[in-house]
Image (cartoon, rainbow, N blue to C red):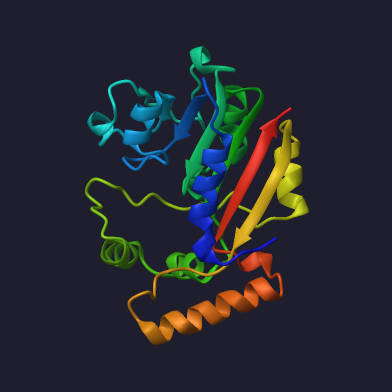
Amino acid sequence: MTKPFRHSYPDYHKLIASSVFEGIRICEIGPSGQPSIKSSIIKAKGLDYTIIDIETTYWEEYNPEVEKFNIDLQRDFDSSLENKFDLVISQMVLEHIEDSKSFHEGIFNLLKRGGSAIHLYANPYSIPAIVNGILPESIGSFILSKIKNRDLDKNHKYPAFYRWCFFPSQKANRNFESLGYRIVDHMGYPGHNYFQRVPILNQLEQLYSWALCKFKFKKFSTLSLLHVKKQ
């Protein structure tokens, strides 16, 4: 199934909110200073929240009660975290993972039986991804700093590999099922929001996005939202 890009982040946050219950243990992978659940909500609800990240620049800004682990799940695993979490989440991380099988095995080991993983990630065949792949790194970083208002000295631009970053498909499902997951939902979101300040281009982009959704061209989705459970 596909929906326009504007639904992607709201759907991600709604899915997380609907998955939270009393006493839940949550682990977020790679938030880099922008956790999916705001610090104020973590504190107000007293959530048991853990962060695993290779980027430590913003760690001092997190709530003191948030546990933090500087681990690369592609290569390392802390046995104290095994079968600990009810929910593992990530946004815009999977496309930067080089060894996807090891990474997702690591997440599987983090989860309790019946636990869920929710990932919002970029796909390789959208226009933004293709342009990003063609442009030299220096130009790509410059554009990113302008359109995202992003400080690249603190938020690094990591290389994108797009391994296992499939659009919703049987192939994608088979990969995750081979690790012991059950696919709950997998949604594609065509389009982007880079032309918001250019009305004519923005209208053309919305028309293009509508056509992709109308004719179910999932392959050209910009983002995908994946929800899996550990069986």
Residue 220: % across, % down: 61, 68
Quarter of image, res 202: bottom left
Residue 155: % across, % down: 29, 47
Establish if 78 lies above or below 75.
Answer: above
**190 relative to 230 in the view: left or right:** left
Quarter of image, res 110: top right
Q: What residue lies at 34% left-to-right and 65% top-to-bottom?
A: 140
Tell how many labels.
Answer: 0
Establish if 50 lies above or below 171.
Answer: above
Q: Residue furthest bottom?
A: 200
Establish if 46 lies above or below 38.
Answer: above
Q: Quadrant of the C terminus?
A: top right
Residue 218: % across, % down: 67, 65
**Closest to the observer, 14 or 55:** 14
**Closest to the observer, 158 or 121:** 121
Q: Residue furthest top?
A: 80
Task: Answer yes or no: is residue 164 visible.
Answer: no
Establish if 185 lies above or below 62.
Answer: below
Q: What residue lies at 51% left-to-right and 37% top-to-bottom?
A: 89
Q: What residue lies at 26% left-to-right and 66% top-to-bottom?
A: 146
